[in-house]
């Protein structure tokens, strides 16, 4: 997976949706707990069988609601910790991918540098070869009168020697 703006936005949107889901579930659970508490408690007091501890109905409602909120918050905290761990792992993986990409970029840059050096060397060799071939072409285009006359003179001298010997 490549790290780009679209992927980052996608992860942020998913995280925000999850966060809103948790917040809404807390609100729904709280209102549900308050409604169920209102139905179960009687009008004025809540007491144990021993008669030792008594609460006002409003205090009992508040205690039950707070206990339910605490349970829900603990569950949400566990879920958020798990999602945080997962996001931390994903972040670590993305950092490793970035390091690998940077290594590839450096290797590619080195390859480009080496290729440019080879190209420059080949260009120099080509230019030297071109100069040598041009010099040979100029030399080949020169007339060879001197060698023709010297070869003719040598041939005439050999013919004169042969005629005089015969």
Image (tube, rainbow, N blue to C red):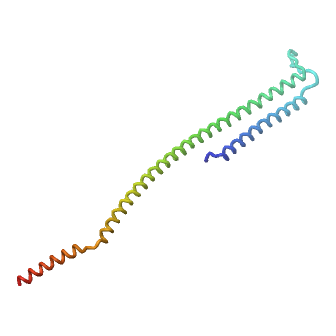
Q: Residue furthest left?
A: 165
Q: Residue at x 35, y 62 (%)?
A: 131
Q: For residue 84, which quarter of the picture?
A: top right
**Residue 146: % across, % down:** 22, 73
Query: In this image, 123 relative to 159: left or right?
Result: right
**Residue 10: % across, % down:** 69, 45
Q: Nearer the viewer, residue 146 or 28?
A: 146
Q: Is residue 106 above or below residue 163?
A: above
Query: In this image, 68 relative to 161: left or right?
Result: right
**Residue 116: % across, % down:** 45, 53
Q: For residue 61, which quarter of the picture?
A: top right
Q: Residue at x 87, y 22 (%)?
A: 59
Q: Is residue 32 above or below residue 107?
A: above
Q: Is residue 99 above or below residue 31?
A: below
**Residue 20: % across, % down:** 77, 38
Q: Nearer the viewer, residue 111 or 67?
A: 111
How many badges with numbers are in the image? 0
Q: Residue at x 83, y 32 (%)?
A: 30
Quadrant where the C terminus is found in the figure: bottom left
Q: Residue furthest top?
A: 52
Q: Residue furthest right?
A: 43
Q: Is residue 150 above or below residue 96?
A: below
Q: Nearer the viewer, residue 145 or 2?
A: 145
Query: In this image, 84 relative to 49: left or right?
Result: left
Query: In this image, 8 relative to 17: left or right?
Result: left
Q: For residue 80, which quarter of the picture?
A: top right
């Amino acid at each position: 997976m490549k790290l780009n703006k679209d992927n980052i936005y996608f992860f942020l949107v998913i995280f925000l949706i999850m966060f809103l889901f948790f917040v809404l579930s807390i609100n729904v659970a709280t209102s549900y707990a308050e409604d169920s508490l209102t139905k179960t408690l009687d009008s004025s007091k809540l007491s144990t069988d021993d008669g030792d501890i008594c609460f006002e109905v409003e205090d009992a409602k508040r205690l039950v609601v707070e206990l339910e909120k605490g349970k829900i918050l603990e569950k949400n905290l566990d879920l958020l910790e798990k999602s945080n761990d997962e996001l931390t792992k994903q972040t670590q993986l993305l950092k490793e991918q970035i390091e690998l990409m940077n290594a590839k970029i450096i290797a590619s840059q080195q390859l480009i540098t080496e290729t440019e050096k080879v190209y420059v060397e080949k260009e120099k060799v080509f230019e030297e070869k071109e100069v040598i071939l041009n010099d040979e072409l100029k030399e080949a285009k020169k007339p060879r009168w001197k060698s023709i006359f010297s070869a003719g003179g040598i041939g005439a001298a050999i013919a004169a020697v042969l005629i005089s010997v015969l």
